[in-house]
Amino acid sequence: MINIHEVLETNEMIEKENLDVRTITLGISLLNCIDTDVDRLCEKIYKRITDTAKDLVSTGKEIEKEYGIPIVNKRISVTPIALVGGSACKTSGDYVKIAKTLDHAAKETGVNFIGGYSALVSKGMTKSDELLIQSIPQALAETDYVCSSVNLGSTKTGLNMDAVKLMGEIILQTAQETKEKDSIGCAKLVVFCNAPDDNPFMAGAFHGVTEADEIINVGVSGPGVMRKALESVHGADFGKLCEKVKKTAFKITRVGQLVAREASQRLGIPFGIIDLSLAPTPAIGDSIADIFEEMGLQRAGAPGTTAALALLNDQVKKGGVMASSYVGGLSGAFIPVSEDQGMIHAVEDGALTLEKLEAMTCVCSVGLDMVAIPGDTKATTISGIIADEMAIGMINQKTTAVRLIPVIGKGVGEIVEFGGLLGYAPVMPVNQFDCSEFINRGGRIPAPIHSFKN
């Protein structure tokens, strides 16, 4: 039973502590759209998306109004387009046509983003995969709402180092194509190791081939709620700290469960998962870094930060799985730089470096996220950073990701403004020692020995 105290507590979380449902993401399979003609394919894709998602935004607004729960984004994810376009697309320009179709469909349905302009190349690349990847810079420069992702490795298959090398070049090209807007195209492009099929968060959302024709996935967030809750155990031992994180994560997840159930029933689409990820925003008080400070660290990046993040991530998941039978996606804590006011301050104060962020990604939900780096960074250096992150994911059997933004024309210490949920970021220094000979070897790094579990 829910008592009046819990109702009031939830209201306080929403009104004063930035509790929100970050996204309702409608996953749509496009496999039944496959055609040998690119124009017919685009027509089918547009009709499939606009028919299926026509009520998504209005339903989200209805739930928001009825329950008083902010739902920040309504999004769509689709089957990785490299799988859908293989029969029809003969050039990278054909793939750009599909990207523009997705963008048009997103605008028609009123969603904030559409994800799935993606390729899964953890073991090798088909011709279709390669064409899509080559099209990414132009596609992201000529669309507004399309998000792109590429899975470069997995614990089962190892790392595709040819694709890692290529993505370093593609990220730099995307930065060049969108340099008039501070290389913002790179904010809509992420590379993964062990990408999940059911992630509702952008830029990495796609509708996995293991999913049903349509599915509703909901992402919940509440770093401000978590920080406020930890005030009550200030100075207490780690046992009490863990218990408070777990109980708070349970309450946050229940809010997501309510929204997911309502959205599923009203849209007539099956419920998939709740992704409980403490995803920050640039708003004051809605920061993962502030949670670390409440735990007793002077700044994010101070000694002890990785341990604090490990504790937070684990207890969030433990609380979440008690609140919903279907917790999935990425669930845990995100540590983006540009989207977190406390992380930005930590970088500006010199407390947080790229190397410390890499260490933290061993225990967080994702990886190096929304990190601005100098625009003159070499493609092979970007590939080297990607390779390090992918290796962490592969060896540790977890999802890791990289969303780097080489800001053309800007150097270390300069500020980049992205706006909205993307926030702003100081450009961070990158290790200048060369790794090009290593990256240019090509081929594949084999899967680790502990991957053989058949």
Image (tube, rainbow, N blue to C red):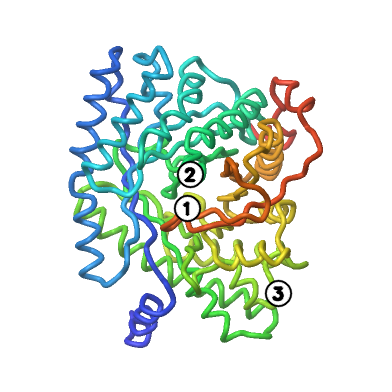
The residue positioned 41% from the left and 49% from the top of the image is 200
Residue 309's place in the image compared with 247, above or below, is above
Image coordinates for residue 39, horizontal then vertical, percent: 25, 18
| Quarter holding residue 47 | top left
Image coordinates for residue 149, horizontal then vertical, percent: 49, 36
| Quarter holding residue 340 | bottom right
The residue type indicated by label 3 comes to Leu
Residue 173's place in the image compared with 14, above or below, is above
Residue 250 visible at all: yes
Closest to the observer: 303 or 259?
Answer: 303
N-terminal of the two: label 3 or label 1? 3
- The quadrant of the image that shows the N terminus is bottom left
N-terminal of the two: label 3 or label 2? 2
Task: Name the residue that disc number 2 marks.
Answer: 184
The residue type indicated by label 1 comes to Phe
Q: Are marks 3 and 1 in contact (CB under 8 Å)?
A: no
Image coordinates for residue 298, horizontal then vertical, percent: 71, 75
- The quadrant of the image that shows the C terminus is top right
The residue positioned 42% from the left and 14% from the top of the image is 91
- Between the residue at mark 1 and the residue at mark 2, the CA separation in whole angstroms equals 7 Å
Closest to the observer: 434 or 40?
Answer: 434
Task: Name the residue that disc number 3 marks.
Answer: 297
Q: Are marks 1 and 2 in contact (CB under 8 Å)?
A: yes
Residue 402 visible at all: no
Q: Is residue 333 left or right of residue 447?
A: left
**Dot in front, 3 or 1:** 1
Task: Name the residue that disc number 1 marks.
Answer: 418
